[in-house]
Image (tube, helix red, strand yellow):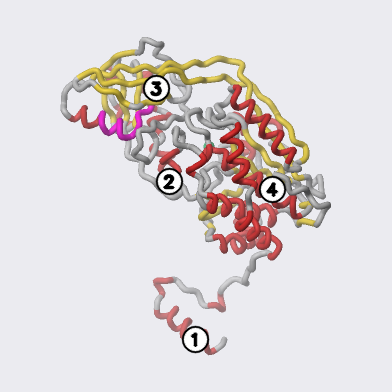
Amino acid sequence: MTRTLLPALLLAAATPALAQQSIATLPPPVLADPKAAALRDDALENDHYAWDITEGLTTEVGQRLAATGAEARARDWGVRRLKAMGFANVRVEPFTMPVWTRGAESAEIVSPFPQKLAIAALGYSGSTGPAGVTGEIIYFDSVDALRAAPDSAVRGKIVFIDHHMMPSQDGSDYGQFGAPRRQGPTVASKKGAIGIVIRSIGTDHHRNPHTGVQYFTDGATPIPAGALAIPDAEQLVRVLKRGRPVVMHLTLVSQKTEGGQSGNVIAEVPGRDPRAPILLVGGHLDSWDQGTGAIDDASGVAIVTAAAKHIMDAGRPQRTIRVVWFGAEEPGGLGGKAYAEAHGKEPHAIAAESDFGADRIWRFSSQLSKTDPASYAQLAASLAPLGITKNDKGEADGTDVEPTIAAGAPWISLGQDGSRYFDVHHTPDDTLDKIDPAQLRQNVAAWTTMLALLSGGIEPGAKQPKRR
Ligand SMILES: [Zn+2]
């Protein structure tokens, strides 16, 4: 012990609330891996791949609704881009699914105070037909309140479900407050409602409704189901509070047809050891149809692809890195299920997805904390300079990799700051200008670090072309 440490140790003893540990009992130091650190710092400073992919996909394709021609154009775009970047084994693995498309949509208070409200149909909404439906609004502040109501109170009416979602850094509110969208339409239908409108599952105050998927389950007949923009939902609440019956005219014309096609776009950085379990990283290529799907999830496919490209530029990893641009995530994670059916039994060293926007990574968690503590400690040390903390209690996430994780793949989650994610999520506002290039580069730096550390070592190979 040196003399200079003494005052610090005395201070530690005097302030037990800070839980300072004696340096004698600290675990052995773990320093950042120098090679991974160099790649990390280069990506943080210089990455342009992620921006180029996000900008290119959102500009040259735009919205990419699952199983439509737009999503097919996005797959073609992806194959061309991935090949041009030097990836190997670039291919599309197709699957079939129903296609749901949006038509005319409007909501209008007929009485007592006639006025229009901003609305968007939810995925797989039933159709009102062009004439629309008219009914009295019945208010609930949660799905549980709707569930508790007698059927006779709901029959023949248009259900309105309110909620109180707030922004959070980890996005955890989405689980609970998303229930009006996920379960509300089925419960309303079972109780005989002629339609349902919900307060958008979002945290902004723009007049942009947030769409999103819902399914009619338990044999429920599809009914028209839409989300009101948040200011419009608040307006409806004020109108209802006047105490007079509120009648709404609702038009949601949508279409569902069978036999559509989607697919996963797959590309690889081949490893030196073809038998070594692979590193699977992905995002989803499809998007909702109002914006251009910049944060959800062009940036996700761009981040993981850019990170894999940085490894490719550095040489040959021992493990193969497989990049998947999953199809049809928004209507229910169909691409992730198709991937797991085809590849779930192949050995994976890790499965990870980027699907929470493009703001900075602020913490990570991984199963490796239990199965491979040395790698976990190395990750923590190498990610810390990016301001990323470890979360020992984290859980797996990523809709598209969940089925592969369920099949046995170890998981890692690089968690983005979601404080503003639900301001634009599933709205017309999900556009390129919402992406901060500096935070996007920090994402790429984190993913590059992770791939470098788990790659089994990168050996200098033939110089890769630095094309876009
Ligand atoms: Zn997404």
Main SS category, magenta section: helix
x then y, percent, for residue 307: 66, 49
Q: Is residue 241 left or right of residue 93?
A: left
Q: CA distance from mark 2 to mark 3?
A: 26 Å
The residue identified by callout 2 is 420
- Residue beneath the point at 33% across and 34% down: 230
Question: Residue 225, which numbered label?
Answer: 3
Q: Quadrant of the C terminus?
A: top right
* Quadrant in which residue 147 is drawn: top left
User: Is the residue marked by circle 3 packed among few (<14), some (14-19), or many (20+) residues within 10 Å?
Assistant: many
Mark 2 or 4 closer to N-term? Answer: 4
User: Does label 3 point to a residue whose CB lies under 8 Å from ligand 1?
Assistant: no
* Quadrant in which residue 257 is drawn: top right
User: Is the residue marked by circle 2 packed among few (<14), some (14-19), or many (20+) residues within 10 Å?
Assistant: some
Q: CA distance from mark 3 to mark 4?
A: 40 Å
- Element under label 4? helix
Mark 2 or 1 closer to N-term? Answer: 1
- Residue beneath the point at 40% across and 76% down: 15
User: Is the residue marked by circle 1 packed among few (<14), some (14-19), or many (20+) residues within 10 Å?
Assistant: few
Residue 235 counted in the magenta span: yes
Q: What segment carries the magenta color?
A: 226-236
The reply to whether dot 2 and dot 3 touch (C-beta < 8 Å) is no
Mark 3: which amino acid?
Ala
The reply to whether dot 3 and dot 4 touch (C-beta < 8 Å) is no
User: Does label 4 point to a residue whose CB lies under 8 Å from ligand 1?
Assistant: no
Question: Residue 6, which numbered label?
Answer: 1
Q: CA distance from mark 3 to mark 1?
A: 67 Å
The nearer-to-camera label among 3 and 4 is: 4
User: Is the residue marked by circle 4 packed among few (<14), some (14-19), or many (20+) residues within 10 Å?
Assistant: many
